Image (spheres, rainbow, N blue to C red):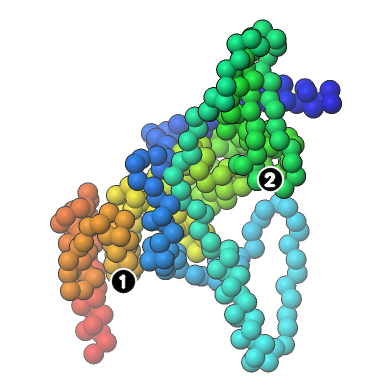
Amino acid sequence: MAGLRRTLRTVLKNYNSPCFHVKRLLNYTGQCYDGDSDPGPIFINPDVQGILQSLTRVDYDRVFRKRKLGTKKPSDPEYKFMTDAELQEALRAAKERAAELLQIPPVVKVRNTEAKVVCKDPELQGLESSRMVFTDITFGVQDEQRIVVVREPDGTLREAEWAVRQRVNQTYFPDKAKQMQVPRMFLDSYLERLLDKNEYEYVLDRACVQFEPDDPDYQRLISIVYQHLNDHNKFELLRSTRHFGSLTFYLVWNRNIDNLLLELIQTMRIEEADQLLALYSLIHQKRFEGEDPLDRVQSYIEQAAGKKGSLELAVQAYKDVAARRAVEAL
């Protein structure tokens, strides 16, 4: 018990440590889904999910590639002789497994971090010189639903701050994948170096393990990663990963799709560019008229684009290449 008391004292002493907050990186300001609109219902809309999954692209070589995670030794490849029926079943199982691996992390509104006051008992003021934490340690209760309250030295009893709640949960019901303190890789120059090395997927994977989707620190962190990736046009590094859908949703939600749209046009993916604009229309209720995808892209450039010049040049280049290919096909 003495050891547990010391641990809880550490929890309370350090709950507001700078390590609990993702710091600002370079010129990027962390953003949260904290506006009046809740992105959750839009994100789970079947039409939105369908577009996000389509834009992700399923490259099985990328999905099932060997990754250096440092947790286990790579296994030797296994070769089998199969009948046609067995091969089709194996392909079906591979598609299901790929769909699981490409499941997009949830996009939800940031949580309300305000700690509700339960009661005030001034007669208890001075009884203790430090704060006391009371925790329901019933097994099987979800962490976010577990009752955790704090008694202040002035007698106020209130719900625990989220930082305290998370650390107490980790103390009583440790998750081996999580760390008690926020990993240093998410702070200052450590994160900067990782992003400069294009380790976007690694950072996002680790963030999904350490934080919950509605955690302000999580949302600020991934927004910095997305902004850095978008500014450096490294979209291909997240394609065929579970994070491309949430990246695309973030860019569309914040009306910042010019770089992604430009990349799709330059790589002759005009149908995907049209899907991106369809997603923009679903989220922002803005239609781009046109008889074909290229017309709708042109409509977006005229109405909403910030990089009109670059996009217009890309569209013209696309038309030239398409015309040349049409002639060569004759």
Residue 43 placement: quadrant: bottom left
Of callouts 1 and 2, which one flags the residue occurring earlier in the amino acid sequence? 2
Element class at badge 1 = helix
The amino acid type found where label 2 is placed reads Val
Q: Is residue 149 visible?
A: yes
Residue for point 64% across, 63% down: 66
Instruction: Please indicate whether residue 252 sits to the left or right of residue 97 in the image.
Output: left
Residue for point 50% across, 58% down: 104
Q: Name the residue under label 1.
A: 271
Instruction: Please indicate whether residue 235 sits to the left or right of residue 5 in the image.
Output: left
In the rendered view, tell whether residue 46 sits above or below residue 27: below
In the rendered view, tell whether residue 12 sits above or below residue 124: below
The amino acid type found where label 1 is placed reads Glu
Find the distance from the CA under tag 1 to the CA under tag 2.
46 Å
Instruction: Please indicate whether residue 135 sits to the left or right of residue 109 in the image.
Output: right
Foreground: disc 1 or disc 2: 2
Q: Mark 2 points at which residue?
A: 141
